[in-house]
């Protein structure tokens, strides 16, 4: 909450004449998310298995609705939001959770067939890539990539053969190249990633400004609230690039502390998965931990210039109601599994 306010205050004052505009909304979703986390923590995790199909079907319906003009809202060139009053939700975020719940059920019931390419791997991935295709119609490559990566991690843990993954990996690379070449703006993101200074006022602008934030932060930072890049240099710094503002204000020490907190959370999540009393609990925990880990790696990679810009939020820190609520719900599920864990 502190970093959302610090990163967004200048932009919010200019656009909405209220420096707390984004902070107040984030506080509302944080309150709802924490309430949902505590409620879910007290729901036995295997109950999710009973409603996995309903949850998945509901999310598929939302993905269809968001594509309908008049229902879906366009932001940043993507029709990814459904407006509800003064707020909006992002169905693709909740599809990630729905796919984890359903795939955990599917894998726990058919683990013996997962080594079969025809009867195990293809049925598992078929539904995943159907959801990915619908998300790409928005288009939202970043969210779709996180969902696919999470599901592949679950399938791998379930015992799928490495050779099958190698074959699909080649196909996936070819498909990814095709997606990049099919949209000029994605190609610009790749070229700007390789050399952002080739187009410093265009496709390379965000990466350059992000590095200009991280570099001057030094070891201890400029001080909380003292960021310079948030003064209209780094576009919407409270969302995808909030880690750059955090590093500028709190320095290498602050950024490293955030990464340490994520590492502790993921380590505990792995312990919960290893100690779960049944396969469903293990796969469910693996899915949630993988989702958080992949999203953190992509976001930090983009902000530090190690990956092309993809539009992925940083879990628990970036502004965004759907993302924050989803992550807190996932932690609630992990907390309940940990109650039954052997560790």
Image (cartoon, rainbow, N blue to C red):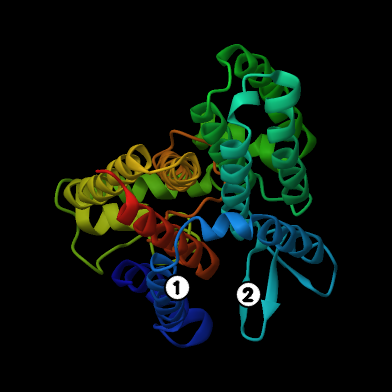
Image quadrant where residue 76 sits: bottom right
Q: Where is residue 329 in the image (x, y as percent from the top left)?
A: 46, 63
Image quadrant where residue 109 sits: top right
Q: Please indicate, yes or no, whether residue 198 appears anywhere in the rendered image.
A: no
Instruction: Count neighbours of disc 1 (C-alpha within 10 A) and say few if under 14, some if 14 to 19, many if 20 or more.
Output: some
Residue situated furthest top in the rendering? 163
Q: Please indicate, yes or no, whether residue 66 appears anywhere in the rendered image.
A: yes
Query: In the image shown, does 317 or 153 lie closer to the viewer?
Result: 153
From the image, state whether disc 1 or disc 2 is nearer to you: 1
Tell me: residue 190, above or below residue 240.
above
Picture disc at residue 88: 2
Tell me: residue 80, above or below residue 173.
below
Query: In the image shown, does 182 or 340 lie closer to the viewer?
Result: 340
- The residue that appears at 24% across and 43% down in the rendered structure is 343
Picture disc at residue 54: none
Query: In the image shown, does 22 or 320 lie closer to the viewer?
Result: 320
Q: Horizontally, is 125 left or right of 165 in the view?
A: right
- Residue placed under numbered mark 1 in the picture: 36
Q: Horizontally, is 67 left or right of 82 in the view?
A: right
Q: What element carries label 1?
A: helix
- The residue that appears at 15% across and 46% down in the rendered structure is 219
Q: Where is residue 261 in the image (x, y as percent from the top left)?
A: 25, 50
Instruction: Count neighbours of disc 2 (C-alpha within 10 A) and say few if under 14, some if 14 to 19, many if 20 or more.
Output: some
- The residue that appears at 28% across and 45% down in the rendered structure is 268
Query: In the image shown, does 59 or 171 lie closer to the viewer?
Result: 59
Going from N to C along the chain, the mark reached first, 1 or 2, is 1
Image quadrant where residue 85 sits: bottom right
Residue situated furthest right in the rendering? 69
Tell me: residue 148, above or below residue 46.
above
What distance separates the C-alpha of mark 1 from that of mark 2?
18 Å
């Amino acid at each position: 909450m502190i970093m959302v306010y610090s990163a967004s205050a200048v932009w919010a004052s200019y656009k909405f004449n209220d420096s707390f505009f984004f902070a107040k909304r984030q506080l509302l979703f944080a309150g709802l998310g924490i309430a949902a986390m505590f409620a879910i923590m007290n729901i036995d995790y295997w109950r999710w298995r009973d409603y996995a199909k309903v949850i998945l079907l509901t999310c598929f319906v939302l993905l269809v609705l968001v594509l309908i003009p008049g229902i879906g809202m366009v932001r940043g060139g993507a029709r990814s939001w459904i407006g509800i009053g003064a707020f909006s939700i992002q169905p693709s975020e909740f599809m990630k959770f729905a796919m984890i719940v359903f795939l955990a059920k599917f894998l726990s019931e058919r683990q013996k067939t997962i080594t079969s390419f025809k009867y195990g791997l293809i049925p598992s991935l078929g539904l995943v890539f159907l959801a990915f295709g619908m998300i790409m119609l928005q288009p939202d490559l970043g969210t779709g990539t996180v969902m696919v990566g999470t599901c592949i991690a679950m399938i791998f843990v379930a015992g799928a053969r490495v050779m099958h993954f190698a074959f699909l990996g080649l196909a996936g690379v070819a498909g990814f190249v095709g997606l990049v070449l099919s949209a000029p703006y994605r190609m610009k993101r790749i070229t700007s990633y390789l050399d952002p200074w080739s187009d410093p006022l265009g496709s390379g602008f965000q990466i350059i400004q992000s590095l200009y934030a991280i570099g001057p932060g030094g070891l201890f930072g400029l001080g909380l609230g003292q960021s310079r890049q948030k003064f209209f240099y780094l576009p919407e710094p409270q969302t995808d690039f909030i880690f750059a503002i955090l590093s500028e204000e709190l320095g290498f020490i602050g950024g490293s502390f955030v990464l340490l907190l994520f590492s502790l959370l993921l380590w505990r999540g792995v312990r919960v998965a290893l100690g779960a009393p049944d396969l469903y609990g293990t796969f469910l925990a693996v899915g949630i931990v993988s989702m958080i880990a992949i999203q953190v790696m992509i976001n930090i990679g983009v902000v530090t210039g190690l990956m092309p810009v993809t539009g992925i939020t940083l879990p628990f820190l970036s502004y965004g109601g759907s993302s924050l609520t989803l992550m807190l719900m996932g932690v609630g599920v992990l907390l309940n599994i940990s109650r039954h864990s052997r560790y």
